[in-house]
Amino acid sequence: MNSAAGAVSQANRAASASARLVLLLLRARAVLVLFLLLVLFSALAPEFLTANNFSILTKHVAITALLAVGMTFVVLTGGIDLSVGSIAGLSGMVAGYLITQGISFGGSIHYLPVAMVVLLAVVVCLVVGALNGWLVAKAGVAPFIATLGTLYIARGAALLISNGKTFPGLGGSVTHGSTGFTAFGQSFLLHVPTPVWMMMALFAVAWVAAAKTPFGRHVYAVGGNERAARLAGIRVPRVKMVSYLFSALCAALVGLIIASQLEAAHPATGESFELNAIAAVVLGGTSLMGGRGSVTGSLIGAFVIGVLADGMVMLGISEFWQIVIKGVVIVLAVAVDQLQARLQARLLPFLAQTGIEGER
Amino acid sequence: MSQPHQLKEREIVLEARSVTKRYPGNVALDRVTYRIYRNQVNVLIGENGAGKSTLMRILAGVERADEGELFLDGQHIELDSPRDAAAHGIAIVHQELLALTNLNVSENIFAGRELCRAALLVNEREQEGRSDAALKRLRKPMDVKAESGRLSLGYRQIVEIARTLDQRSKILILDEPTSALSTSEAESLFDVIMDLKRAGVTIVYISHRLHELLHLGDHFTVLRSGRVVGESLRAEVSRQWIVECMSGRKETDEAIAPGRAATSAEVLAVRELTLASVADDEAAQTALHGVDLSLHAGEVLGLYGLLGAGRTELVEALAGLRSIESGEILLRGKRVQADGVRGAMKAGIVLMPEERQRDGLFPDLSIRENMMMSAADGLFLSREAEIRRVNELAAELHIVARDMELPVTTLSGGNQQKVLLARCLLCSPAVLLMDEPTRGVDVNAKVEIYAILRRLAAKGLSIIFTSSEIEETRALADRVLVLCQGRIAAEFTRDELTDEGLFAAASPSIVSSTSNLRDLASGHTV
């Protein structure tokens, strides 16, 4: 290689390195925003950065994060799951019913052990998730409509279970052998709340699945180009089904955590939770068109939403303003996402420049 | 038919001067100067990918040229949209009919330019009256309130032409108008074209079908690989001139080493394969009628045919993408179960699709992920193993990329095509199906892909490819089957293959049985 060509390729390398840096900063913007919020609230509210407050904060975040991590696969396939809030409500009500009312057969009432109760609540929710998956993958119903339908179905079912009433006293009774449910949302392990452990565990599973397994790659493929995915031999319906099932599983856990924390199951639990989850997913940079995004992004998005909400409460900002600000943040996030997509498209040929050069 | 005029008497109505259009990885038009003569049937010929459709889209305002200018009646014009073009009297009837199937005939004719009463309400009565008048002028009266989705493709074409007629278009571009029509429909379309010409309309006519062109055309222009390679008047045009101009045979004759005779073991056998025709709004499926074929180890079989002949349907049926009505597919004597793409893939039949953007690539994913997509199986992915495989294949197929982790869209068309080929090869297929293997790739990449396929065949891989290019079919195939209207119309070995023979066998109106094809192949004119 002569010196002139060497200089050109060196200049190219330098230019493409700076292009990479710009892209990296844009991709990491959710982390930057989170960092800025933490600094801002720590400066304005002295009690914000205490261990106690942090424990409360992470418990709040765990709810949104669980839903968002679950929703991420669905959104990556190009779908959406509006039913997660209702599923959370249903899961709490099933657990509440089983703990306080028991199951009657053979003329007598039987109370199940807590593990059984949790399992049954999860199974009921998975049935709703399977219904979502079937409607979207097999019946060809648009995900928005399919999950809007199951949103109503699950909410209605939750209301029917108790006829609209709350099940109190989920602490259970020793005589029935139904105690222990409160541990689900209230206990600690190594000074960390159990719900936070659950969030971390599911995040880890989801991260590995997305980044390290064929399933994860198939999810991105289905969302990126469904026709091509089918032609590449990917079982598209199965990928979608698993995504909706995982979302329902996460929602079921959220419902159980909330019921356990409150020691009561209320049929309206989880209303509009789906919107927080979608907001977290979008803030994390996952495209609602599918095919682009990450589980980590959704986790960070959930933190942004949680920190923003708790911080504003601590600063004493009016509840109504909080709603407005949350909306502004979401709109800004999507606008920046579009900017990133456009910038990326413009930078890519630049990144590949030496490749084209080599071809000649 | 009109008398041929002298060239100097002809008046240029629309001229594209030195037009260039580039797509990523491909130059579609390279400084093309194209003239359209007033009140003539201007025929534009060229193989797929020659740039005909791109040129027409530029003339119709659908796309803008990167370089070059347009002149209408000697005046420089800018066309930013189809609406601009319509205002200048230029109209196009697209190859893929754009009819709004949920609307009725008159609503289609006035779509986007509705006649209004009191500037608000659609004046249906006047729209219907004018639609009726336009259709009557075309001598194709029909119920203007009929839903256009129920019309045959031929009538949809008439509706589109009626639309341009009502707009008083001076220049009408017809892009492969007969590709989806039956013979009688096509003939009545020719009457319409003659009527329009008599009424003073300038026609631009694009088609692959030689006999149509020779029947209708006044002035001929041939495009090849984005350049004008020939211009002539009807009186001076012969079939041979067209075929030679289109295929440019001198350049590539015998460029590829001759293939082997099919003496090896039979790998794939297809018997009596029948596929129902589907007239979906989006994609019409040509019916296949009792198709038989056999493929030997290491053989490269070409499927030649015109648009709508059923080539894509045949390979997609073999790949498990379409459910077959009857017939059987045997791979090494064992029946292949028809349970979708995955089943066919597992059995060893893999398809590389025609439209790689639509059916092949995942634009958000990296080159590596695109390549490994079909191979991903098991519980976990191994990044190291993948990188190793990707680098091996990139070296073998000469995929030139700066970094395999960049999005696949950063590659040129030819390299993207090789990524898809690599994906297919990773399934270790026994039979590789390729639908238009070199569509939208540049000339150098084409030659490279041919060489790769030859090498693969030499190693024992059996390949079926479809093509609408004679040049490609001749360069690549050991044996050619010609499809016409869903039937195998002829079979040629490499030695028997002639350009004219292929053309004749593929043209629907003159094919009745295989026996008289050999007469046609020896230069019989229509």
Image (cartoon, helix red, strand yellow):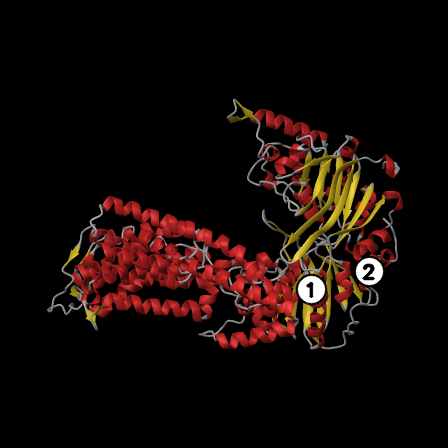
Residue labelled with disc 1: B445
Residue labelled with disc 2: B249
Question: Residue A143, position in %: x, y?
Answer: 42, 53
Nearer mark to the viewer, of 1 and 2 = 1
Question: Residue B195, position in %: x, y?
Answer: 77, 33
Residue drawn at (59%, 62%) of the image: A353
Q: Name which quarter of the figure residue A187 lies in.
A: bottom left
Visible residue check, residue B336: no
Compared across the picture, whether B125 is left or right of A248 comes to right
Q: Are marks 1 and 2 on the same chain?
A: yes
Q: Residue furthest left?
A: A175
Which amino acid lies under the numbered mark 2 shown in the image of this protein? Answer: Arg
Q: Locate the N terminus of chain B by quadrant.
A: top right
- For mark 2, name the chain: B
Which amino acid lies under the numbered mark 1 shown in the image of this protein? Answer: Ala
Question: Residue A272, position in %: x, y?
Answer: 29, 50
Q: Does label 1 or label 2 sit earlier along the sequence?
A: 2
Taking A285 as reference, is A115 above or below it? below
Q: Residues within 10 Å of mark 2 (few under 14, many from 20)?
A: some
Compared across the picture, whether A349 is left or right of A287 comes to right
Taking A52 as reference, is B67 above or below it? above
